[in-house]
Amino acid sequence: MPRKRVSGDKRSAGKRDPTRPLGLSPRRSSKRPRWHQKQKSLEIQEQEQEQEQDHFDDRSRFLSYPTHKVNRLLEPGPVVLVTTGSLADRTHNIMTMGFHMMIQHEEPTLVGACIGPWDKSFDNLKRTGQCVLAVPAAELLEQVVDIGNCSGETVDKWDAFKMIPVEPPESPLPPETDPELEDGEEKGQGYMRLERTARAPLVGGKDIMANIQCVVHDRALVATYNLWILRVVGAWVNRDLDLNYGQSNQQLEEPCGAVGGGKRQMRMVHHRGDGRFVVDGEELDLRDRMIKWEEFQD
């Protein structure tokens, strides 16, 4: 019986192409199927939505706090983070600071801060006249130390240490310096001229206890001591923070708008000056003995 003829194409269909190396399969199209592209697009959208939600959570994490009570956040002497610059023009920077002090309780609330020309924040503060003091909890101590070990001139510290810049809520700022007082500025009188578009960001995150927005009030001591006198114009506390540190007489609402009710006893960090730190521990309540300071108690 004559053998059935097979075409050349069919004979070679099962044979290996001698020009193709062993073990390699024929090249497939690099195009992804449409269903895969659609799935990837949905994943990107979900990630963007999660990022937007995280950002929203950081904005809503903080509740307004009365500026005349800011001494309760700073008088204990915590290590703080200082932000300067603006999110809008990407000049925002963050630094660690241990040299600060309360100067005046209210009308206006004043804080002293030592920030020198060796800090990138010095130029930002000089240019914009604005900054934010953020109080970190003990859980952030290693990041706080690392932030203080490098310069914003060479490192984007927000990105490197996973810190979250948050656009500050709207709050009234003092007027710009009256031209008639410009000569007096050398003596520290009046306000530094402000760039109204520059707004130092708050620091977001669950381990930030509070953010305190400041403007430069007096710079008479900057040239000699690098000491800036800052005026507090806004303050916000973490909504999870136990504002009364576990005391039973905590007030949930006050006429001035401060809100408490958080149950987390977040601990401040204090630098001993040699690389060692201590955190808040046992509280000793001597309010009944401080009769001279009753006006500053609830």
Image: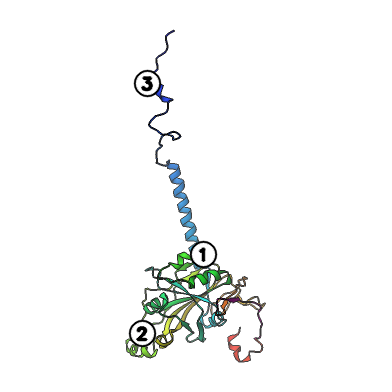
**Colour mode?**
rainbow
Q: Which mark is residue 174?
A: none
Instruction: Find out whether residue 277 is within the magenta segment.
Output: yes
Q: Which numbered circle lies on residue 57?
A: 1
Q: Amino acid at mark 2?
A: Thr
Spatial CA distance of label 1 from label 2 is 36 Å
Q: Pick the residue in front: 72 or 16.
A: 16
Q: Residue 230's quadrant in the figure? A: bottom left
The N terminus lies in quadrant: top left
Tag 2's secondary structure?
loop
Identify the residue shown where x is 34% and y is 86%.
Answer: 178
Where does the image place residue 71, in percent across and percent down from the top left? 54, 82
Q: Are marks 3 and 2 in contact (CB under 8 Å)?
A: no
Q: Residues within 10 Å of mark 1 (few under 14, many from 20)?
A: some
Q: Which residues, given as a range, are shown in magenta?
A: 274-286
Numbered circle sitting on residue 8: 3
Q: Which residue is mark 2?
A: 177
Main secondary structure along the magenta-highlighted residues: loop
Does label 1 or label 3 sit earlier along the sequence? 3
Drawn side of residue 286 relative to residue 217, left or right: right
| Residue type marked 1 | Asp
Say few, some or many: other residues with alpha carbon within 10 Å of mark 2 (under 14 / 14 to 19 / 20 or more).
some
Q: For this view, does 147 lie left or right of residue 287? A: left
Please give the name of the residue rendered at 37% of the width and 76% of the height, measured from the top-left corner.
196
